[in-house]
Amino acid sequence: VLGLLVWTLIAGTEYFLYPAFGWVMFVAVFYWVLTVFFLIIYMTMTYTRIPQVPWTTVGLFFNGSAFILYLIAAIVDASSVIKELDSHNYNSWAASSFFAFMVTSCYAGNTYFSFISWRSRTLQ
C-alpha cells in the first residue's frame, strides 16, 4: 500500500519534467509489481509446488535489492523536492518522499527477517 502511494503521488504531477522522479517512478512501480507477484505466489501457496526454487534465498535477494534501490530512490526523491509556484507538485512530492522512506524501512525489516529465515535454512 505504501509503495502504491509513492508512485501514485508522483504520477499525479508533472514528474516527467524532472529525470530524478522518473527513477523514483521506475523503482516504485517495479517493486510494487514484484511485491504483488510474490504476494500472489505466497497466498496461493504456489511455492510449495515448485520446490526446486530456493524461496528463502529468492526472498532475501528480492527484499535486499528492494531495500537498497528504494533507499536510493527515497534519497533522490527527497533531494529533488523543490518549492514551486504550483503547491500541488510540492505537496505530492514531499508526501511521496515520506512514503518512500516508510517503504524503505518496511523492506529493511523484511530483509532482516528474510536473512534470519535464510540463515536458519542454511544451518540445517
Image (cartoon, grey):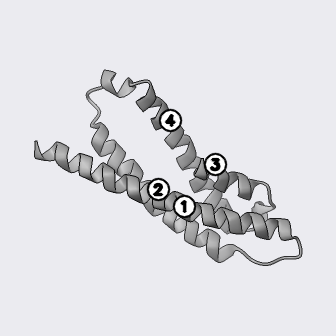
Pinpoint residue 69: horizontal percent, then vertical percent: 49, 61
Alpha-carbon span between mark 4 and mark 2: 17 Å
> Which of marks 3 and 4 precedes in the sequence?
3
Q: Amino acid at mark 1?
A: Met
- Is there a contact, CB below 8 Å, between mark 4 and mark 2? no
Categorize mark 1 by other alpha carbons within 10 Å: few (<14), some (14-19), many (20+).
some
Which residue is at a point 44% across and 55% down the rendered structure image?
107
Closer mark to the observer between disc 2 and disc 3: 2
Quarter of the image for the C terminus: give it. top left
Assign a secondary structure to mark 1: helix
Give the residue at the far left of this rendering.
Answer: 124
Alpha-carbon span between mark 1 and mark 3: 12 Å
Q: Amino acid at mark 3?
A: Leu
Give the residue at the far top of this rendering.
Answer: 49
Q: Which residue is label 3 attached to?
A: 4
Assign a secondary structure to mark 3: helix
Closer mark to the observer between disc 4 and disc 3: 3
- Is there a contact, CB below 8 Å, between mark 1 and mark 2? yes
Alpha-carbon span between mark 1 and mark 2: 6 Å
Residue 64 shows up from this direction: no
Alpha-carbon span between mark 4 and mark 1: 21 Å
Which residue is at a point 42% across and 56% down the rendered structure image?
65
Which residue is at a point 32% across and 21% down the rendered structure image?
49
- Is there a contact, CB below 8 Å, between mark 2 and mark 3? no
> Which of marks 2 and 4 precedes in the sequence?
4
Residue 106, disc: 2
Residue 93 sits in quarter: bottom right
Q: Amino acid at mark 4?
A: Phe
